[in-house]
Image (tube, rainbow, N blue to C red):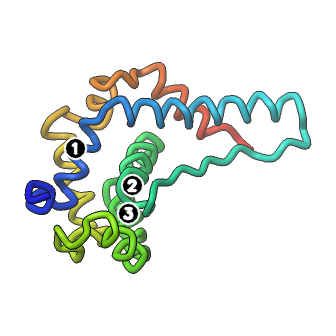
Amino acid sequence: FKAVEEAGLTGLYEVLLETKQFIVVVLQAITLHLEQRSRQRKIDSDSKPAKVLFHCTLGKDRTGLIAMICQHLMGASDEQIVNDFGKSDCVRDLAKRVLKHYFKGKVDLSRWCLADASAMTHTLMYIRNRYGSIHGYLHQIGFDQSWIQRLVEAFSIEN
């Protein structure tokens, strides 16, 4: 736990980003879901618009990374992404309760319960420094241009 404590949120986000298969699977699942709902709407005009809900235990770490990637692909600025991420800070009290059980007093929870905007800023810089860009990262992990285009188109479909 000492290494986790020292790395903090930014270290956690780097580890999650390097768990490449997780990111690819989630982005592909979102893409396929939106495409399926779009096809369904063409057949059944009474069908509801496509929506996507993705979350993890607290909705700020894994969820924050997936949301950051989707927002970037849809044209959001870094400032918008960081500001939206900061809104997840509302789960701070829940995070303390959940993480207290998980870490059992082995780490300083005050660092882990925040949705600190600087952690997302650092994460964006990490991706750009290591991969050149978010697109470069996505290509490296196997979410290539065809998948990127499909996801953007699926998000862009008029509902």
User: Could you say which quadrant of the image residue 41 lies in?
Assistant: top right
Q: Residue at x 38, y 36 (%)?
A: 23
Q: Disc 1 versus disc 3: distance between alpha carbons?
A: 18 Å
Work out whether residue 12 or residue 75 is closer to the camera in this orientation and state it.
12
Q: Residue at x 9, y 59 (%)?
A: 2
Q: Residue at x 27, y 31 (%)?
A: 137
119 over 54 or under it: above or below: below
Which mark sits nearer the N-terminus, 1 or 2?
Answer: 1
Q: Are marks 2 and 3 in contact (CB under 8 Å)?
A: yes
Q: Secondary structure at mark 1?
A: helix
Q: Disc 1 versus disc 2: distance between alpha carbons?
A: 14 Å
Q: Amino acid at mark 2?
A: Gly
Q: Amino acid at mark 3?
A: Phe
Which mark sits nearer the N-terminus, 1 or 3?
Answer: 1
Instruction: Identify the residue position indicated by label 2 in the image.
Output: 64
Q: Disc 2 versus disc 3: distance between alpha carbons?
A: 6 Å
Q: Residues within 10 Å of mark 1 (few under 14, many from 20)?
A: few
Q: Amino acid at mark 1?
A: Val
Q: Secondary structure at mark 2?
A: helix
Q: Secondary structure at mark 3?
A: helix
Instruction: Identify the residue position indicated by label 1 in the image.
Output: 15
Instruction: Identify the residue position indicated by label 3 in the image.
Output: 85
11 over 119 or under it: above or below: above
Which quadrant is the N terminus positioned in?
Answer: bottom left
Q: Residue at x 37, y 73 (%)?
A: 89
Work out whether residue 32 or residue 154 is closer to the camera in this orientation and state it.
32
Taking 148 as reference, is 133 left or right? left
